[in-house]
Image: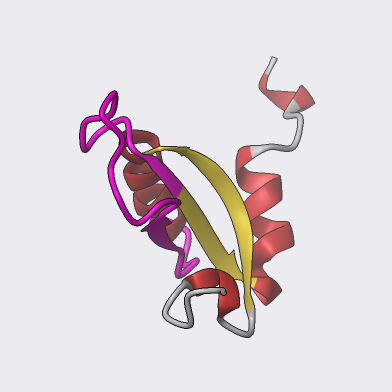
Amino acid sequence: MADPDTLAQTRGMKKFFTGAAINADLLVTMLDKHGISARQEFAHAEMGDDEDEFSRETVVFVPEEDYDRAYQLFYAEKGDEL
C-alpha cells in the first residue's frame, strides 16, 4: 500500500531526480534559487546498512507546472556554453 504522506502521491508534484541525499540537497537549493519550489524525501523509509545520511537514496519532486523549466535548467544541452 502506498504511503499517503509521500510527495509521490501529492497531486501537482512530479518526480524530477533520484539520487544520493547530498546531491538532492544541492539540487533543491539550486532549484529554489530559480524560484522552483522543489521538495525531497527519502526513497525508502529505513536506511540501509551500507548507507549513511549523505548517500541515502532520495527523490526530488517539483511542481508539474515547473517541470519543463527545471529540466531546461539542469538537463538540457547547453550548446551556447561552449
Is 29 located above or below residue 20 in the figure? below
> Up-down: is 23 above or below 50?
below
Query: Total of numbered circles in the picture?
Result: 0
Magenta part, dominant SS: loop
Residue 71 left/right relative to 60: right
Q: Is residue 7 above or below residue 34?
A: below
In the rendered image, residue 53 lying in the magenta stretch gets the answer yes
The colour scheme used to paint the residues is: secondary structure
The quadrant in which residue 45 appears is: bottom left
**Residue that appears at 61% across and 53% down:** 16
- Would residue 48 appear left or right of 9 to someone viewing this image? left
Residue 75, horizontal then vertical, whole percent: 68, 37
In this rendering, position of residue 75 left or right of residue 53: right
Residue 77: where, in percent of width, then height? 76, 29
Q: Which residues are magenta?
A: 33-58
Residue 63 percent coordinates (x, y): 59, 73
Q: What residue appears at the point 61 percent right and 40 percent down from the top-left corner?
A: 74
Q: Is residue 57 magenta?
A: yes
Residue ranking furthest to the front: 1
- x and y percent of residue 15 in the render? 62, 59
Residue located farthest toward the top when viewing the structure as drawn:
82
Residue drawn at x 62%, y 46% is 73
Residue at horizontal 40%, vertical 59%? Answer: 40
Q: Which residue is at the far left?
A: 53
Q: 50 above or below 64?
A: above
The C terminus: image quadrant = top right
Q: Quadrant of residue 37?
A: bottom left
